[in-house]
Amino acid sequence: VRHMTLAFFYGFSHTFQQNITAKQTNRPQQLSDDFLMLVKQHFKQEHSLEFYANKLCVTPKHLTTTIKSTTKHEEDADMAGTLYLVATPIGNLGDMTLRAADTLREVDFIACEDTRNSMKLMNLLDISKPVISYFEHNKAQKGNQIVDRILAGETCALVSDAGSPAISDPGEDLVKQCAAAGIVVSAIPGPCAVITALSISGQTTGRFCFEGFLSTAKKSRREHLESLIDEQRTMIFY
């Protein structure tokens, strides 16, 4: 593999040297994306930037600028047309991660379980983004709108009132819609009430089951609990 990579390197170098060089014309030539990938992935840790610039007949400054530009384009492509599930604090605002905050700043719009509640967090983080409500009673209509916007190329962050979205909340249905539409769904990990409760429970944590919310209707709640009479694992309820 090493010899093949070197052959690829010098093959590209020979191709560039057949052209009028950037040093001679003061015009930076177009660098191959494939070659830039090799520079970034295979060679950078073994040789100096000047080494590659000399082989490509370009200035080190031009090579640095071009690599940064292609890297930015790759990052922008990763953000296109994606639903991000962003976990938010469940009691302590200090639990908001840097990645979660950055994601909220970078997406095109934010879908909130309660816009008033989420706006408090956004104001605290000095984030200004368009928001759309998405909760149990409007999820059918708003879910379609969100999916359509993502399919059109926008990026969306889904947040719940607290904790990780799509866990026993309406976000579950939005994730299903996105999966059916072929939309990439990416989780931005953070606080989760289920795991937090389990970790401090003092109960067995090797095997557990999450049963979501118990029904407020007496009959349904009794039926749910009766179905779990023989359950041996640690059980977690909302």
Image (cartoon, grey):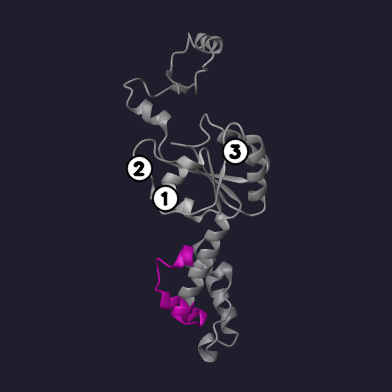
Main SS of the magenta part reads: helix
**Rendered image: mark on residue 161:** none
From the viewer's side, name the closer residue of 120 and 211: 120
Q: Is residue 33 above or below residue 93?
A: below
Local SS, label 2: helix
Local SS, label 1: helix
**Mark 2 vs mark 1: in front:** 1
Q: What is the span of residues highlighted in magenta in the rendered image?
A: 40-62
**Residue at x 62%, y 35% (from the top left corner):** 138
**Sequence-first tag of 2 and 3:** 2
Q: Position of residue 99 (x, y in %)?
A: 42, 50
From the viewer's side, name the closer residue of 86 and 55: 86
**Residue at x 42%, y 45% (from the top left corner):** 120
Residue 51 in magenta?
Answer: yes
How would you rate the neighbour count of disc 1 (Cα within 10 Å): few for under 14, some for 14-19, many for 20 or more?
A: few
What amino acid is at disc 2? Leu
Q: Position of residue 52 (x, y in %)?
A: 46, 76
